[in-house]
Amino acid sequence: MIDKIEYDIIDTPNNCKMGEAMDKTKKINFISNNPDAHKGVEIGDVISELRPDIVIICSTLQYLYPYQELMLQIIKSHARYIYITRTPMTKSVSTFFCRQRICPAVGRNKGLYLGDIKVTIVNEEELGNFMSSNNYIERIKLFHSSNEASFSNFPSPYNEIFYKNYIFEYDI
C-alpha cells in the first residue's frame, strides 16, 4: 500500500538537497521553492498541478506576511485536507508580529546570534474564520504545547502563546 503513495515535498533548496540525499528509495519528489527555479510560477500553481490530497504546513506560516497569501495559493489547489502544525497561536489578542532572535541551540553556530526575523503570531479564531470563508471546515484541533516561556518578556496577554495542530477539510 505504501508503495502506491506519491510523495511530493516543496521546500527550500537546501532542505530539498538534504532530503534527496537521505531518500534511498528515490520515490520522493523534492521540489525546490527557489524563485529562480520557478520564474513567474506561484507556489500555488505548483501545488495545484500536483493535485494533493493533503498539504502539510509545518512551522511556516509564522514566517510569512501576510500568511493569508500563501494560504490562498494552497486553497486554490482544492487539497482535500490542510494540516497546520508548529505555528505560534494566540486566543487573547488579534494576530500580531514580533521579532525572533536566531540563536541556534545546537550545531556549529550553537549559542551565536545570527540575526532576527519577523514572526507572525496567528489568532486562532481569525485563522478559523479565514479557512471557513474559503470553504475549509475545521475537523481537528489538538493542543500541541505551550510556548509561553519563549514569550515571557512580553506583556500579558501577548505572552499567551501556544501551538495546536489543525486539520481543515475542503467542503466540496
Image: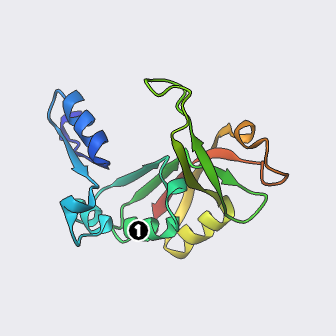
Whether residue 1 is visible, yes or no, is no
Extreme-right residue of the structure: 156
Would you name the residue on which mark 1 appears?
75
Q: Residue at x 23, y 59 (%)?
A: 50
Asked if 129 appears above or below 110 in the picture, the reply is: below
Residue drawn at (55%, 76%), measured in percent from left and top? 133
- Percent across and percent down for residue 28 are 20, 40
Residue 67 % position (x, y)? 51, 64
Q: Relative to residue 90, is residue 50 drawn left or right?
A: left
Locate residue 37: give its quadrant. Answer: bottom left
Q: Is residue 115 above or below residue 37?
A: above
Q: Residue 45, image x and y in percent?
A: 27, 68
Q: Nearer the viewer, residue 137 or 145?
A: 145
Q: Label 1's element?
A: helix
Residue 144 on image: x %, y %: 62, 39
> Can you tell which quarter of the image residue 82 is in?
bottom left
For the question of whether residue 15 can be seen, the reply is yes
Question: If the image is split into quadrants, where does the C terminus sit?
Answer: bottom left
| Residue at 27% from the left image edge and 66% from the top image edge | 48
Left or right, 26 with respect to 63, comes to left
Which residue lies at the image location 43% right of the left edge and 65% below the top edge?
A: 70
Give the class, few, some or many, for how many residues have Cα within 10 Å of label 1's Cα (few <14, many ≥20): many
Disc 1 residue type (three-letter): Ile
Q: Quadrant of the N terminus?
A: top left
Q: Relative to the observer, which residue lies in front, 117 or 145?
A: 117
